[in-house]
Image: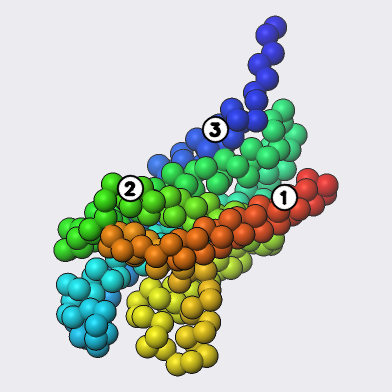
Amino acid sequence: MTTITLTPNQDSITMMRRRLLHLRRYPTLTVMLVGMPVLFLALFVYVFGGTLGDGLGAHTVGRRDYLQFLAPAILVMAVASVATGTAGAVAMDKTGGIMARFHTMAIAPSSILTGHVLGALVQSALAVAVTAAAAMAIGYRPEATPGEWAAALGVLVLAAFAFTWLTVAFGLASKSVETATNLPMLLVLLPFLGSGFVPTESMPAGLRWFAEHQPFTSLIDSVRGLLAGNADGGDITLAVVWSVALAFIGWRLSLRLFARERAR
């Protein structure tokens, strides 16, 4: 009898395929995660866009200009939205006994988590594509060169990678799927307390300080600048630093929690 031993890379790809199969089996979850950013886009452009656009002075004038300001923030929210679903998927594997069953199989243990991360990155790419298409359909017109587009996508990929590892840790730390689903909601709320919807200089002093020093502001400002063709190198550097730091924290915490789970 021939024994087939899978390498860690092959195991990770197998686990990623398993995660992606859930897209087909649970289409409503995918529609909700991908559709929420599009819903926010439509809500803020068509319901609040006229008022917010006129009230932002030199930044925007009217609904169409507000769309230029808002769309990059919604792209960042799209990857954060997908990441929130990862916590629930990991918690479901943990509480449903699937993870314990994988521990008894001849596979690389790390592939169980890596598969979730890779699958979430594919799902994030879908969310960004759908959100960008929706934004352009209603009038968003980026002025980025191909290189700036590539850089903006690179920032979004880094953000997705960082957020996903954080939510993997949330899922492992949670005792139920419901708890895991609620924990990452901060990732969806933080853009509202940053430069996503209004400039930070329009905020009161204390809130402005927080908004200017939290990770979403640098991520949003870097994507906004790159797609507008006037990127600030400082914003991009800060966005990369935040993404790497958050990814490392999430990865290390996930490994520690996963080791504890295997030891039980």
- The residue located at (28%, 60%) in the rendering is 229
Element assignment for label 1: helix
Residue receiving disc 2: 147
Where is residue 27 shown, x and y percent of the image? 38, 49
Residue type at mark 3: give it: Ile
Q: Residues within 10 Å of mark 2 (few under 14, many from 20)?
A: few
What is the distance, in whole Å, between disc 3 and disc 2 at their CAs?
Answer: 29 Å
Please name which of the two marks, 3 or 2, marks the residue nearer to the observer.
2
> Where is residue 248 drawn, in percent x and y?
65, 55
- Hey, which residue is sitting farthest right in the picture? 263
* Residue 42 located left or right of residue 179: left
Question: From where the camera sits, is residue 26 visible?
Answer: no
Q: Quadrant of residue 204?
A: bottom left
Asked if the residue at tag 2 contacts the one at tag 3, i.e. Cβ–Cβ closer than 8 Å, the answer is no
Q: Which type of secondary structure does the marked residue at label 3 adopt? A: helix
Residue topped by disc 3: 13
| Residues under numbered marks 1 and 2 in contact, where contact means CB atoms less than 8 Å apart | no
Q: Which residue is mark 1?
A: 255
Q: In the rendered structure, which amino acid carries the disc numbered 2?
A: Gly
Q: Residue furthest top?
A: 1
